[in-house]
Image: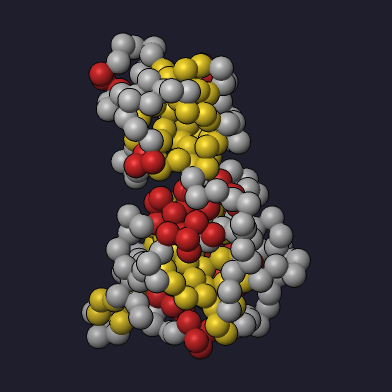
Amino acid sequence: MLSCRADDAGGIVAAMIVLFTDFGLQGPYTGQMAAVLHQTAPGVPVISLFADLPPGQARPAAYLLAAYGTWFPPGTVLLCVVDPGVGSDRRALIVEADGRFYVGPDNGLFEIVLRRASRAQIWQISWRPPVLSASFHGRDLFAPVAARLARGETSESLGQASQAAPQPSWPDDLAEIVYIDHYGNALTGLRGETIARGALLSAAGRVLAHSETFSAVPQGTAFWYVNSNGLVEIAVNQGRADRELGLAIGASIAIAG
């Protein structure tokens, strides 16, 4: 069940809808999807969490979703679109994990969320709009379904109980760069709780020590730390780690000592 609040008219709406996409920061895609949400679930706040996920790459996105999705309260509907297989026979899913609902393609995007959830259910979406384009299921399928969940419709009314396609080769923690932020900091798929604070990390031929904060190391020093959502992140104090260390999405990280 959704953890909900009453609106001014006495109806039941979800806590919020959160956008998690690789659509980019320009162009019409996020706006069109947000318009569908507004039309279908007026009054539900829509929050853009990520619009610049690694394009078409469900694996790095899965580790980010697991780390950042749990920051939101139960009752949140997360609309997740990293969908290079749109138009193919890949399935469309609703996932309920620890009280949060995730809507998106069955391509591994929910793999890590499901592994870490204490309780979870999955539905294959059977609901269809009057018109479904071959190339924009984010707007035409996933957004309407997320909005319907947010306004109180049940998962059972929108799909049938199912399972997600497993990704057994994906590790529980991914020792790779999964995202470069606006400042050039490089996020990994490693949870900070899995690495001792005294450990040294190796990235792009550099050995990096841990620091709790940027200000604890000299300007220009590269280091690793645990970010506010629990992921290991590589940074340079007052610099860009991506440029200065030559880091990119998919670059490997190793524990050096």
Q: Quadrant of the C terminus?
A: top left
Residue 175 percent across, percent down from the top left: 52, 37
Residue 58 percent across, percent down from the top left: 60, 52
Taking the spot 31% from the left edge, 11% from the top edge, the residue there is: 218
In this orientation, which residue lies closer to the viewer: 189 or 169? 169
Q: Quadrant of the N terminus?
A: bottom left
Q: Residue 41: tell me if it is visible.
A: no
Taking the spot 41% from the left edge, 64% from the top edge, the residue there is: 117
Q: Residue furthest front?
A: 257
Taking the spot 53% from the left edge, 53% from the top edge, the residue there is: 62
Position of 211 relative to 22 (above/below) = above
Residue 251, image quadrant: top right
Q: Residue furthest bottom?
A: 157
Residue 134 percent across, percent down from the top left: 74, 67
Position of 228 relative to 116 (above/below) = above
Position of 24 relative to 254 (above/below) = below
Display coloring: secondary structure
Taking the spot 25% from the left edge, 76% from the top edge, the residue there is: 5
Residue 245 percent across, percent down from the top left: 53, 18
Report the number of discs.
0
Q: Residue 78: tell me if it is visible.
A: yes
| 99 lies left or right of 243 | left
In this orientation, which residue lies closer to the viewer: 204 or 36? 204
Position of 204 relative to 177 (above/below) = above
Residue 229, image quadrant: top left
